Image: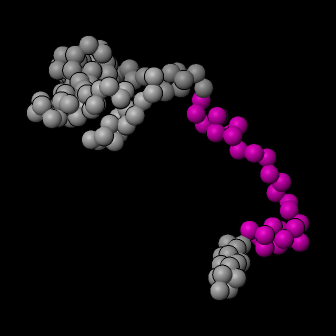
Amino acid sequence: MRLIKCPRCELNYITPEEGYCKICKREMKGEPQQEEIELCTVCNEHPVLPGKDVCLFCLKEMNANDDRGDEETENPVDEASLSGIDPVSAMDEIIPDIPEDIPEREYDEIESEMSLEELEDEEAEDDDDDEEDKI
């Protein structure tokens, strides 16, 4: 079966027998466009409220929990207990060991290799050379 693009919108693929895609047919008949309904991120059952990512039921429940939340603030949850690692100690593990005593000569070489100004000058010269070659 060979598919072709819809001759009207040129976006959707159809079989040659169809003539137009389903969306174009719906538009030509004047039917309103069907919007996809987003489901609540908490319960995945009810449609979300406009501008929110939760449904009315879950929003009411969350607000009720906030009212009772005064009792829960006495015993806050520690972030370290949730992840199982201490965030500060994890950062120490990420930092690589770099020798502190780089000889002055090597430091100058490293610095000169990393100079952005020199790279920009070289790129500008290369661009000028390319333009001269084209002429």
Residue 54 position (above or below residue 10): above
Q: Is residue 33 magenta?
A: no
Q: Residue furthest front?
A: 17
Task: Give the percent coordinates (x, y) of residue 3.
Answer: 42, 30
Q: Nearer the viewer, residue 13 or 71?
A: 13
Task: Give the percent coordinates (x, y) of residue 32.
Answer: 12, 31
Residue 55 position (above or below residue 96): above
The answer, for residue 101, to whether it is visible in the render is yes
Q: Nearer the viewer, residue 48 or 29?
A: 29
The answer, for residue 128, to whether it is visible in the render is no
Examine the image and state in which quarter residue 110 appears: bottom right
| Residue visible at 39% across and 23% down in the picture | 76
| Residue visible at 82% across and 72% down in the picture | 108
Q: What is the total number of numbered labels drawn onto the structure image? A: 0
Which scheme is used to colour this image of the protein?
Answer: one colour
What span is in magenta?
86-114
Task: Give the percent coordinates (x, y) of residue 46.
Answer: 22, 16
Q: Main secondary structure of the magenta part?
A: helix
Q: Nearer the viewer, residue 80 or 46?
A: 46
